[in-house]
């Protein structure tokens, strides 16, 4: 089944209208009496996958879950750093004839800039309350620049799956999750991020549509090549983050892990990162629909890649 979109102009207009109705401020979500509660887990088990690790006790699983919460802030902050320039570059190609498109896309970039600040504020609160240094992959700007060196179609397809992934994270494992008692502030972060991301998928889809219409078929192929290359590139970063998390866990718990304990933690966490940051996005039905909708071939390749991130 495919979704019938309104015309691009109508879609830009509707998206802008919906976006202006959602208008939270950072201080509504974090700061003042809104603090992180370090007695609770930050991420749902579906996204952090710590329960299966047999060499950790309950307290250590809580610590690893919170380290995963911190890396979630870091990684989302990182992707926002290439989303903002990518959208601004795209605005330059829409021209001023469709001023609503320009307005909607600039609003999109503004919201993503706000999200960078949101993730940074949460990371500051984390650092104060956790009491131990946790490293994230970087330098962030270098990674964002490396992503932006790829063709715009490849980058926009990556952004599209990330937007669907963000929505999935909140809807599938936080919104109606009554079985886990998660930190309310972290849930609020995921909810408020989701509220604004809901408009972004429409705008990303419109960007993909415009790019596909403007490109020759060999340029589309090259853009899709870049999309697959970028998945591998980002996965390389995620696998580095797993190692950094293990070091953070050892520091925070004071444990020295044996080789087999390290292997167990790494194996489970690698699968979790692959699912949380790639699989849950590239296997999303709405993302797959875009591949069909705009006649991008390579669906079989996408399904193969998707399977390898959903184990
Ligand atoms: Fe965002
Ligand atoms: Fe977004």
Image (cartoon, rainbow, N blue to C red):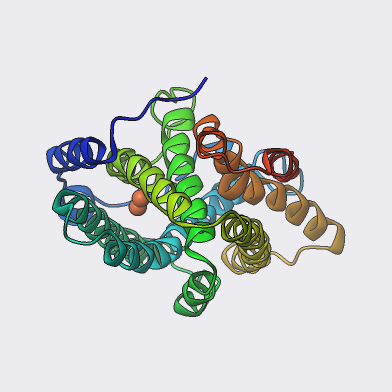
- Residue visible at 36% across and 45% down? 206
Residue 135 visible in the displayed image: no
The x and y percentages for residue 115 are 30, 57
Placement of 12 over or under 207, stated as above or below: above
- Residue visible at 58% across and 39% down? 280
- Residue visible at 73% across and 44% down? 301
Q: Is residue 150 left or right of residue 238?
A: left
Q: Is residue 295 left or right of residue 103?
A: right
Q: Is residue 250 left or right of residue 95?
A: right
Return the residue nearer the eye: 9 or 42.
9
The x and y percentages for residue 220 are 57, 55
Return the residue nearer the eye: 215 or 244.
215
Placement of 282 over or under 233, stated as above or below: above
The x and y percentages for residue 182 are 42, 37
- Residue visible at 54% across and 57% down? 216
Residue 226 visible in the displayed image: yes
The single residue placed furthest to the right in the displayed view is 260
Q: In the picture, residue 255 is in which quadrant? A: bottom right
The single residue placed furthest to the top in the displayed view is 1
Return the residue nearer the eye: 87 or 142.
87
Classify the position of the C terminus by image quarter. Answer: top right
The x and y percentages for residue 10 are 21, 35
């Amino acid at each position: 089944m495919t979704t019938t979109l309104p015309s691009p102009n109508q879609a830009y207009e509707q998206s802008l209208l919906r976006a202006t109705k959602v208008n939270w401020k950072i201080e509504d979500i974090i700061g003042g009496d809104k603090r992180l509660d370090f007695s609770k887990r930050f991420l749902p088990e579906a996204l952090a996958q710590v329960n299966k690790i047999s060499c950790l006790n309950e307290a250590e699983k809580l610590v690893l879950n919170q380290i995963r919460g911190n890396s979630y802030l870091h990684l989302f902050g990182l992707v926002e750093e290439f989303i903002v320039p990518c959208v601004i570059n795209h605005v330059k190609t829409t021209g001023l004839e469709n001023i609503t498109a320009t307005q909607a896309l600039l609003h999109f970039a503004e919201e993503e800039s706000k999200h960078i600040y949101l993730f940074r504020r949460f990371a500051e609160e984390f650092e104060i309350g956790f009491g131990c240094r946790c490293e994230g992959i970087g330098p962030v700007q270098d990674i964002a620049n490396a992503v932006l060196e790829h063709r715009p179609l490849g980058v926009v397809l990556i952004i599209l799956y990330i937007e669907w992934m963000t929505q999935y994270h909140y809807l599938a494992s936080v919104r109606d999750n009554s079985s886990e008692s998660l930190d309310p502030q972290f849930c609020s972060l995921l909810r408020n991020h989701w509220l604004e991301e809901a408009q972004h998928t429409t705008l990303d889809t419109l960007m993909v549509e415009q790019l596909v219409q403007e490109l020759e078929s060999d340029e589309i192929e090259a853009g899709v090549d870049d999309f697959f290359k970028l998945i591998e590139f980002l996965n390389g970063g995620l696998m580095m983050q797993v190692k950094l998390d293990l070091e953070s866990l050892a520091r925070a718990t004071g444990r020295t892990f044996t080789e087999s304990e390290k292997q167990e933690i790494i194996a489970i966490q690698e699968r979790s990162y692959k699912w949380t940051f790639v699989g849950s996005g590239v296997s999303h039905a709405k993302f797959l629909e875009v591949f069909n909708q705009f006649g991008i071939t390579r669906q079989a390749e996408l399904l193969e890649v998707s399977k390898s991130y959903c184990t």
